[in-house]
Structure formats: structure tokens, C-alpha cells
Amino acid sequence: MKCDRLVCWMLLGWLLAGYGYAQIRGGAETAQFEPGDHVLYQEDLSGTPIGAQVEGWEIVRGSYEVAEFLDRRWFRPLERDTRVLRLLTFPQDFSVEFTTYLSAEAGARLKVFLYTARDLERERMGPDGPSQVYLIVGRGYHPDHDFVHLRVYDPAQRRYQDVVSPGSYKFTPNQPHRVALQVRDGQLQLFVDGTRVALTPFRPEAPLVAIGFIFDAGAGHELPYKDRPALVDGLRIAGYSRPVGRATGGVFLYWVLPVSQDSLPQLFAQSQTYNGSVALDALRQRHDWQKATLLVVDLPANPFAASGAQVQAQGPEWEKLVQRLKQELDVVRQHGGGLLIVGDGSDGRTERERQLLASQRALAFAAWLAQQGIGNPQHLLSIVVENGGYESIYFVADNGGYESIYSLRLERKQ
């Protein structure tokens, strides 16, 4: 009996010890950064001469040059507290990525700001704002780690909210760090070297119009700042051609209604609604809509084979989809809306191939819908003639016309 009791206590201790070492599994461990697919600005500096500067950046204070380090080229500040600014219209949903290297001497720090027009009017790149996002990537006070510090502006409270404090996460020093911000559906996520370190609500008080960098460090060091700086490279800012939601791949379908979510009519596609994407922002501006909402239309499956642009949509599930769309089309027409068709080329091998594949798939699926009686294929030909760089097609329910949303033929610096 005593032996049995001893065994029970040993088993209980073993279970408690095992429970103590159990790992929590959530988004912090599993979430992956999803970069925007519609590039707004990209600069890798590989073609920029050493000692030159980059066109389009305003120097608010100090000076910088392009320099080479670790076999790559960087923005290198030549003075402490150098501040550079670039004006750029951000969509509601976007991503920002960059690589930084922090010199060990005197605690190098890189400050990153995202601004509204009012922020810039109040103070053009103040050392601590005003801005909607205030991110610091820095070397710790003891040079054994790097850290991040994130604050976001809360319009309701009219103050900054600390999301990540400087000592919360420590990263291996003396190596480049890839930092990424992802803003989708009113949520901001911060990733460092592929790990998500922050998730917070984010709704700026006005559209964002600029990004700024401040290169800083501790004072009073014997080395000039240019020899102990924070460096930046690989900047990429992009929007999302489609909102986050259920996706089968190949193509994505949305009803577009120029009304708020509270005023939506009852449709079969009522499961998910969104108010932010590059395509929706473009339609708002083009049609002067004050409000607009996307309703996700779930597809039975991916209608395209891998890397293909020929529609393969047959069977009772697809017939049911067509019947449903025809029923809903009358309701959408009454509200002045239409159907948004977004091509997905994410399975392409190169950026150019992905863009071309997305364009081809949007057109092919729009043509397939027209063959089913949803739209006129003759009207669809006008898009091919006018613009071969679209990725999204908007079918106007009221007049049966088609519009390309935006061009993907981006101009690159030579």
C-alpha cells in the first residue's frame, strides 16, 4: 500500500512537472508576416553609387549617403540625429519592411514614424512625434542585445499607447534585422526577423501621407556618428490588392456596395465584410463614394490549375454559384454597386510573372462569368485594349461596363 502511494505521488509530481513545461501555442508563435502585393515604393540601393543620395527623400536635418557594409548598400547617416522624410500616400491596409543594422558603440537607434498631414503640419519630424506610429529599433544599453520599442497613437484617448516596451524582447546583436509592419483590417502587427512581437488595434485619425526615419544614438562617444550609426536598407512599402478573408486561390470575388456596413442589404455573401483594400480605395476615389464595403463571395474551389490562366469551373457547385450571383446582381444594381474580380498570381515564380498571372486570371474569370450571363464579353474587350496592366476588374452592375482598378506597370529607377 505504501509502495502504491509512493508511486501515485511520483506520478503526480511527474505530471505537474510536465504541465509546468507545457508550451503555449498562439499567434505569437505561429503568425507569419504577409507582405502587400501592390508595391508603392521599393528601394534596395543595389544600383545606387556609393556616396550618392536617393531621389525623393527630404533631408529635414543632418546628412546621409549611400555606403557599403557587409556586402550590401545602406542609408548611412553622417551626423547624429539625421532625419529624412518621404511623402507617400498610404492605403488603409499596407505593409512596411526594411532591414537595419545597429552599431554597438553608444547605443545606435533607428526611429521610424508614419505621419498624417496634420502630424507634419504640427511639427515636421519632431524627435518623438507627433505621428501615428512611433517605432524604435535600437542597441540595448548593455551591448549584448538589440531591442524594439513600439508606440501607436490612440485618437480616442488622444495619446500614445505603449505596445512593446524596450526590454520586452531581446535580439541577437551584430547582425542585420528584418523589421516589418503589417496593417490589415484595423490591426497592426510588428515582426522582427520573422517573429511577431506585437498585435494591436490601429486606426489612424486620418490617412497616412509620409514615412520618416531618425538616425540616433547616445551622445558623448569618441567615434563620430558616421562610424557607429544605425543603417537602413531594403525598404519596401506595399498595399494589398484584396482584403484578408477566406481564399481558395486563383481569383477572389467581392460584391462592392457604396454603403456602410450598417446599411448593407441582405445577400448570400453576408459572411464577411471589409472596408479596406487598394482596389476599394481606388473605386472610392473614382466614383466619389463617401463610404463603401466589400462583401466576400466564397468560391467552391480554385478555378485555375497551378501557374495556369484557363478557367476550370464545372459541376453543380459552380452552377449554384452562378445562380446565386444572378439573384444577388439585381440587389447590388439597385444600390449602385458592382462585382470586383481580383486576380491572384501568388503561385508565380517571379514578381513579374505573378503580376502577369494575376492580370490574366482576372480577365479569364471575368470572361467566364460573362459566358454564364453575368456581364457582356464585348464590353470586357475594352479593358484589354485600354490597359494591359490591370490586376483587378470591376463589373458595374448598373450599365454592364467594366473598369480596370489600377496598373501594375510600375516605373523603376534606372
Image: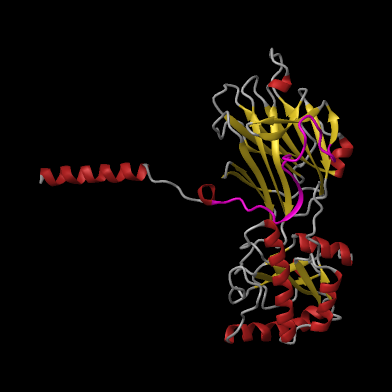
Q: In this image, 387 relative to 314: left or right?
A: right
Residue at 65% across / 61% down in the picture?
A: 244
Q: Position of residue 219 (x, y in %)?
A: 71, 17
User: Which residue is situated farthest in the left direction here?
Assistant: 1
User: How far across and down, in percent of the image, does residue 92 sit?
Assistant: 76, 54
User: Is residue 347 in sight in this rendering?
Assistant: yes
- The magenta span reads 31-57
- Residue plotted at (75% across, 66% down): 391
Asked if 91 appears above or below 131 in the picture, the reply is: below
Residue 38 colored in magenta in the image: yes
What is the total number of numbered labels drawn onto the structure image? 0
The one nearer the camera, 228 or 114, is 228
Residue 245 rendering spot, x and y as whole percentages: 63, 64
Q: Locate residue 104: give its quadrant.
A: top right
87 sits left or right of 324 in the view: right
Q: Is residue 33 above or below residue 164?
A: below
286, above or below 380, in the image: above
Residue at screen point 58% across, 69% down: 306
Residue 397 shows in the view: no
Q: Main secondary structure of the magenta part?
A: loop
Q: Quadrant of residue 111?
A: top right
Where residue 339 sits, quadrant-wise, is: bottom right
Q: Is residue 253 above or below residue 64?
A: below
- Magenta residue check for 118: no
Q: Residue at x 73, y 48 (%)?
A: 237
Q: Residue 174 vs residue 159: left or right?
A: left
Q: How is the image coloured?
A: secondary structure
Q: Nearer the viewer, residue 181 or 105?
A: 105
